[in-house]
Amino acid sequence: MQNLSSAEPAQPIAIPATAFGRAPARPNGPIKVFLYSHDTFGLGHLRRNLAIAHRLLACNGKFSVLLLTGSPVIDQWDLPPGLQVQPLPPVVKTGAESYEARAKGQLFGMVKGYREALILKLVLRDQPDVFLVDHAPAGMNGELLSTLALIRQEHPHTRVMLGLRDILDSPENVRAVWREQNIHALLDHAYDNILVYGSRALFNVVEGYGISKENAKKVVYCGHVVAQPEAHSTHETAPCWDTARAGGRPVVLVTAGGGGDGFFLMSAYLEALPKMAPGPRYSVIVLGPLMAAHESAALHAAAAMCDDVELVDFTTNLVPSLRAASLVIAMAGYNTSAEIIAEKKPAILVPRAAPRAEQLMRARLLAALGLADMVEPDTDIAAQLAAMVPSCLSRPPIPESVWAALDLDGAERVSALLASGHHVEASLI
């Protein structure tokens, strides 16, 4: 990642190594798309944007795509061929709306200033046809405001779109933050469309977040964004565990995305194992690349006391492991939940209760639809898992009609919308 002590800006990562020059103007050249992903903590934003990028780049040269990302693990990820990546110096969230530089010794103000200047420079250079912002309308700590203003004043041909996962937080908290940051006015003036990566039947963002009638006309429900099977690396098609050691037994896969806040779940699962009814099973715990070293060490020590448990540091492609597992235990993050449903896997969701209510709301909604079991966060998680895991492993499969309740064609619809021109009618998905 870029070190601010260097006089040279971070260089784009080319996959493959071809120049991302300014594409010929439409209609003769590809549609130039910028994907902005601020990435402060987990892997959710990165995984969602990579799923969209893969679908765009699979459209026979119709799009060129540049991903602006602050993910600290982007250099470890399998990227779609042809994707250009501009790393942004990574930051970490320290509170509801507060941040600091991830690299020690760097001033957050300078990191933010550099990120803001770099984004502005790239927009001025390449003049994208589409600027798709993930999750944060004003960017991390408002870093997009100057870029959004420039686009509106000097590059009105650029189509500016906001992509939102359906559930951000409790409606009350989202409304309060949006009022404080004047987001509704920003939606009025800066955005042409609001793409919701979800279904109105599952969660109505217009009602939930108090979006105005005028801005409601910009809302398009796309369905959940899930990477298609061909999007995954050809280098990782087998599950992440030692299949010989598993010996054909049912595998319980425990995952918490990036792992930065998954210690509570994994430690509770290890505590639950000795309390479970006897039965053939093999446990695999994927720690995640963002787990703190001391937490990883504690889990390795605890796992050494348990039989038939394998710890995996992380995998950049979880889908083959989801597909091969008999039961998944996860935290109800957007991407993992959608991938579990795409693979039609029985799951126990153990959402965190803070700092946002997003996971708790999602877990309750999916449980109500019969798509997963869940553990309430204010209960004895280890005791609940000890009772639920054997039960979930022995129950009949979930009916196909239940799986069909969640729309998973989001990446395909985003691709179609970006290719459709500047006027998009609100979807009734």
Image (spheres, rainbow, N blue to C red):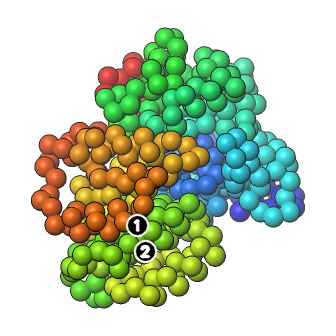
Residue at image location 41% in from the left, 70% down from the top = 269
SS for tag 1? helix
| 198 over 74 or under it: above or below | above
Which residue does the numbered mark 1 point to in the structure image? 382
Looking at numbered disc 1 in the image, what kind of residue is underneath it? Ala
- Earlier sequence position, callout 2 versus callout 1: 2
Front residue of this view, candidates 153 and 2? 2
Which residue does the numbered mark 2 point to in the structure image? 271
Q: Assess disc 1: are there few (<14), some (14-19) or many (≥20) residues with their C-alpha within 10 Å of its C-alpha.
A: many
Task: Give the left or right position of residue 13, taking residue 125 as reference.
Answer: left
SS for tag 2? helix
Front residue of this view, candidates 424 and 8? 424
Residue at image location 23% in from the left, 45% down from the top = 370
Contact flag, marks 2 and 1 (Cβ < 8 Å): yes
Task: Give the left or right position of residue 228, taking residue 141 as reference.
Answer: left
Q: Is residue 230 visible?
A: no
Residue 334 appears at what percent x and percent y? 43, 47
Q: Is residue 98 visible?
A: yes
Task: Give the left or right position of residue 406, taking residue 167 as reference.
Answer: left
Residue 277 appears at what percent x and percent y? 24, 75
Residue 83 appears at what percent x and percent y? 52, 53
Q: Assess disc 2: are there few (<14), some (14-19) or many (≥20) residues with their C-alpha within 10 Å of its C-alpha.
A: some
The N terminus lies in quadrant: bottom right
| 77 over 143 or under it: above or below | below
| 267 over 373 or under it: above or below | below
Query: Residue 258 — which label?
Result: none
Q: CA distance from mark 2 to mark 1?
A: 6 Å
